[in-house]
Image (cartoon, rainbow, N blue to C red):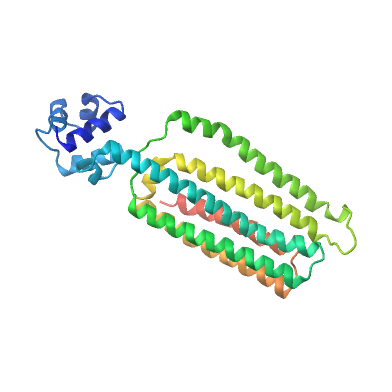
Amino acid sequence: MGIFGDNLQFYRKKKDMTQEQLAEQLEVSRQTVSKWESGVSYPEMEKILQLCDLFSCSMDTLMRNNAAESEVEDGEGYERHMEKRRKNITLGVSLLILSVAFQQLFTGLGWQEAVANTLFFATAIVAILVLVVAGMQEDVYRKNHPIIPEFYTPEEIARFDEKFPIRIATGIGMILVGALLAMNADDFPLWAGAKEEFYYGIFLFLVAIAVGIFVHSGLGKAKYDIAAYNRENCKAVKKENETVGIWCGCIMIVATIVFFVAGFVFNLWEICWVAFPVGGMICGIATLILKGRK
């Protein structure tokens, strides 16, 4: 039995399929599949592509590499990459919101405006750089690993799914508590030199943590959906996702411009942060519209 035959048998058994079931999927006879696995004959290109789609593997892995060893290596590399990406994006998004929270907090504490603004810009710059690096690393990884075999067990996925609603509920609870603080900021006591912005900063601080929980949990859920990862690397879907990314990027740039203009020109720091959640909602609407187009 050759390398291709060994790999075909490995993937077939991994899918818990008989030779008859595989033959039925490919619209060939069971004897044909048996000949492929024994190395007597090889499938035509069309059937090889069908096998790659069926087993979520690359042609190079199916025809030339040891599938069992490649799967372990790909699985470990995918897990490391996705966890690193998950942490970096969570950090970047959280820091972006925290930059505004720090500006409000320290303004509310009576710090000099220049110091609060400097801290805001420094934190925002770090956040943007983290997100840029994470995005570039993701592009490189996807180009080098367009197809990943499914290796997570149902038990691993079920354990994550069990905790997912609790994490989302925790994040929602933090936002609601923060909103309660912000809405009643006028009634809360303030010490000498403090301003209402302090409570707005607390609200944004809680929002940053909550959004971090949402992002970390959402990316964790996406990590387990390897089938979606493989689909997203198809050209048609990738083009669609690039369009969505361009629109959302433009929307958030406009939101950032609105934030700066409202803050520095009109001195509306206490409310200009609204530009970011509004921009996020518009991004969500744009995504739904673009995804729904035929």
Q: Position of residue 115 (x, y in %)?
A: 73, 70
Count of marks placed on residues:
0
- For the N terminus, the image quarter is top left
What residue sits 75% from the left and 45% below the top?
A: 177
Q: Is residue 204 left or right of residue 81?
A: right
218 up-or-down from 16: above or below: below
Q: Quadrant of residue 54?
A: top left
Foreground residue among 130 and 59: 130
Q: In this rendering, is residue 23 above or below 188?
A: above
Residue closest to the eye, 177 or 89: 89
Report the side of 46 relative to 255 (left or right): left
Q: Which residue lies furthest to the left in this view?
A: 40
- In depth, the one of 53 and 106 nearer the eye is 106
Horizontally, residue 42 falls left or right of residue 233, namely left
- The percent coordinates of residue 78 (x first, y second) are 40, 45
Percent x, y of residue 261? 67, 72
Query: Outermost residue, bottom direction?
Result: 265
Q: Can residue 278 be seen in this view?
A: no
The answer to which quarter of the image holds residue 263 is bottom right
The residue drawn where x is 48% and y is 46% is 83
Give the vertical position of 135 relative to 115 (above or below): above
Q: Residue at x 71, y 60 (%)?
A: 102
- Which of the 4 image quadrants contains residue 58? top left
Say whether residue 50 is left or right of residue 186.
left
Say if 106 sits above or below 15 in the image: below
Q: Where is residue 241 in the image (x, y as percent from the top left)?
A: 43, 54
* Residue 91 visible here: yes
The residue positioned 42% from the left and 34% from the top of the image is: 152
